[in-house]
Image (cartoon, coloured by chain):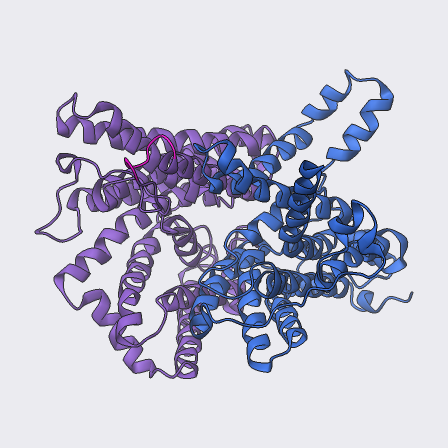
Chain colours: A purple, B blue
Amino acid sequence: MSPEPADRPGSSAPRSPGVRRAWAAWPGEVASRLAPLALALAFVAGLCALLGASPAAVAAALWDGAFGSADQAARVLATLAPLLLCGSGLLFTFRAGLYHLGVEGQLVLGALCATGAARALWPGLPAGLVVALCVAAGALGGVLWGALTGALHTRGRVSEIFAGLGMNFVAQGVVLYLVFGPWKRPGVASMAGTEPLDSALWLSTLGGTELSPAALLLAALALVGTAVVLGRTHFGLRLRAVGLSPEAARVLGVPAAREMLAAFAISGALAGVAGALQVLGTFHRLLPNVSSHLGFLALLVVMLAGRRAALVAPIALFFSALNVGSLKLPMTLGLESSLSGVLQGVLVLLALLSPWKARVGRGGGRPEEA
Amino acid sequence: MDDGGELLSLLATALAASTPLVYAAVGETLTERAGVINLSAEGSMMLSAMVGFAAALTTGSVLAGFAAAAATGALVALVVAIGGIHLRRSQIAIGFVLAMLCADLSSVLGGPFVRVPGPTVPAMSIPVLRDVPILGPLFFRSDPLVYASYLLVACAWVFLYRTRAGLLVRAVGEQPAAAHARGAHVTRVRTAATLVGGALVGIGGAAYSLDFKAGWSHRHTAGYGWIALAIVIFGGFDPVRAALGACLFGVLSSMASLGQSALPSVPAQVFSVAPFALMIVVLALTSSGLLERLGALLPDAARRPLLRAFDATPPAALGKPYPAAADGAEARPRGADQGTK
């Protein structure tokens, strides 16, 4: 079994009967991608109409909110970075067959460790070095959290879903403790977070916008690296074996627990970096809502992408544009900005339930690999 | 004397705080005993809290609110049932997406109801019982919803362990193949358990928005659904222990307000993560076998109750589709579903 050329976990048409079958299957493939989108759009359009807003006006407002000005577009790209990083990490754990809901907590812990490093090292060291060490600390924090979750799963035999969720809450608790306790702003402790970092530590942004090119570049590199590692290396193949059947992998000499732990740790590192970048590039402080649910959103992205690295980028961009675009909905149309979340959720739900998917996906993989 | 009164009122507050969780956790326990994970509780509770409040406000009837909330919870559960049981997609994925989706939907639809005063469940103390020392103020001076939750826990226990139907639910959760061979409609039983469980989760949401913290604001019940899921495991998939777990959470969260003055450095919010920390510890202790090894050091008489009190073994077929995916729907023996009793 050689590594597949592109990184598709058998969800395309079966390869063996020849190219013609694959070509014959492509309308189904396209339908399987587009039908959920069309239905989700119809659902949300109906919802808008129900709430008394014209769907066309909502679409226009969303577009305007996301790409209406350079500032908005930059913000879309700025939100894309953490999504790509968390999504890359999730590709590893999904490949190992794990539902890793703990990505949110890893991001939070990454943000926490980055803030801690900044507090400890600044102004003793040069700013550039501190920033690099903050990112490294974030990665380390994420690895720690990922490894703990992984150990709970592999050693403690706790379902990775509840281990991850539990660790999310614990991370949240630690951040709340720090923000309201030892790290509180002098005088007022509030949900607004800690004292802002010194502006020398802020990531440089593109011409006054929120976009930090360094963060986006790092995220893009992470995604490409993930695609290469998963698609072209022996490690990627071993992860896939574990994901398809841990028992079979064990029989074939692949230690499932070790590979799972590695997947948790890698996803932790990537999500931790995302958290560090949120602190250094976006918020410039630690606040209880530092994750802004981006970890969970990344889960939706990867689920919709069918765990293909190539699809993660466009879907993440789409979701990021929806998130940013919807921020203006309350002002312009009096609708809640959560409307974007509804569209994202319905889209992923319909993709999961789509009957086309099952047929197309029969080529291989577990049934859960919808 | 005064201290005793204070402690009683603290415990009574704790019980009130735990009521929404009791409904949700008992409902989810029922679903999971049938082998289905309904991970949507967080969103489902939030959406039903919103719908329940909106329905009660517009109709002026609290009962209508609870009915609407139960219907909402059941509707969300229906999606899980269709996707996770009938189409045999991942229950985890569907439940998780629903949790996100319903939370956002509650914000979108609930806009007009934010911070609007609305009806609540009227207080009603029970005539004779309220005068019983200690027990009276603790259990019998609140409202019908709380009393109904006591009944629910008892009924759930009797149903699961003392009725044929309850045995059937447990059977499809543990050994669906064996239950099928005995003539049970596995998918039908699971669907029913999922819908009933979902309706109870919905009632839990309304218990929040119509009673415990009456009203609606954005993400009003945030965190409660996840906590309910944790409590189900913490309670070892048993309705009575789940209810006790919910009470423990209530005590923890009402202690938070007291702890505020005693330990000013610890913010109240930190206490809200306690159930999860406890859940992880209990899960790790029981599933890794560490507890059994620790128990081996104890005398027999102490070991049994300890192991039983902390046992959190999930139903054997929890989250697994039936019939197993490999067979495919076509491979299922035709007519087996209509097997005779």
Residue at 52%, 61% (x, y): give it: B98
Residue A292 locus on image (x, y percent): 36, 51
Count the labels in the image.
Answer: 0
Query: Magenta stretch: residue A83 in it?
Result: no
Closest to the observer: B66 or B293?
B66
In the figure, is residue B199 to the left or right of B89? right
- The image shows residue B236 at horizontal and vertical percentages of 72, 42
Asked whether A151 or B146 is in front, the reply is B146
Q: Position of residue A366 (x, y in %)?
A: 56, 51
Q: Nearer the viewer, residue A362 or B114?
A: B114
Q: Quadrant of residue B182?
A: bottom right
Identify the residue at the far front of this view. Answer: B1
**What residue is at 37 percent from the left and 44 percent from the top?**
A288
Where is B35 relative to A253, above or below? below
**Is residue A233 among what the camera can see?**
no
When asked about the image quadrant of residue A301, the answer is: bottom left
Is residue A183 shown in magenta? yes
Q: Is residue B209 left or right of residue A323?
A: right
Residue B216 shows in this picture: yes
Judged from this view, the residue extending furthest toward the right is B341
Magenta-colored span: A181-187
- The correct choice, above or below, for B14 with respect to A36 in the image is above
Residue for point 58% across, 59% down: B89
Q: Which residue appears farthest toward the left when viewing the image? A: A207
Q: Is residue A59 left or right of residue A266?
A: left
Give the x, y percent position of residue A285: 26, 40
Which residue is at the front of the view, A285 or A320? A285
Secondary structure mostly taken by the magenta-highlighted segment of the chain: loop
